[in-house]
Image (cartoon, grey):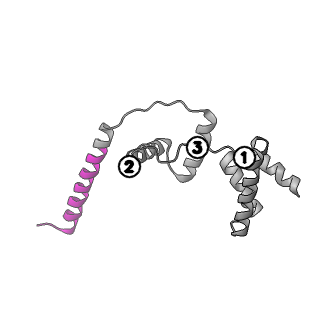
Amino acid sequence: MLTNYNCIAIVYTKMYNIFRKKVDNMASKTANLYIRIEPDVKEKAEIILSKLGISSSNAINMFYNQIILQNGLPFDVKIPNEPLCVDKLSKEEFEEEINKGIRDMNEGNVKSSKEVFDSIKKDYNLWYIAYTFLFKLN
């Protein structure tokens, strides 16, 4: 005859066995990965990962799983467009860029200076240039 304690013991034993099988399967299916990475990149990433409660090993495992799910890298890999340089534009190209700006303004496609400089900092990693330019405007 099964009592409440026996039922709890059976359920606990079955759950333990299921957990044990999963752990055993995980341990037998691991592979080592050796990588070289810049020390400052590693340190900065590990600080962020620790705030998220994720180990480097788990983060790399998640990255590899995303590669499989996405059938490629889980982010765009591209060379950013170079900002326009006025010195390299012909007179016609310069006038076309000015006209684009006027059309955007007339259509209401405008951004605040903060949005523009944040975008420059993000897209071109030019925080110093944007910062100094912003203060020259004031």
Residue numbers of the magenta segment: 1-23
Q: Viewer-nearest of labels 3 and 1? A: 1
Residue 11 among those drawn in magenta: yes
Mark 2 vs mark 1, foreground winner is 1
Q: How many marks?
A: 3
The residue identified by callout 1 is: 84
Residue 69: percent from the left, percent from the top? 38, 49
User: Dot 2: what SS?
Assistant: helix
Q: Of residues 14 and 6, which is closer to you in this image?
A: 14
Q: Which mark is residue 69?
A: 2
Q: Residue at x 75, y 48 (%)?
A: 127
For this orientation, the residue located farthest to the front is: 92
Magenta span dominant secondary structure: helix
Q: Amino acid at mark 2?
A: Leu
**Residue at the left extreme of this rendering:** 1
Is mark 3 in CB contact (under 8 Å) with mark 1?
Answer: no
Label 1 residue SS: loop
Classify mark 3: residues with Cα within 10 Å, few (<14), some (14-19) or many (20+).
few
Q: Is residue 126 visible?
A: yes
User: Of the residues shown, which amino acid type is indicated by label 1?
Assistant: Leu
- Quarter of the figure with residue 105: bottom right
Residue at position x 64%, y 45% from top?
81
Q: Which residue is mark 3?
A: 45
Q: Are marks 3 and 2 in contact (CB under 8 Å)?
A: no
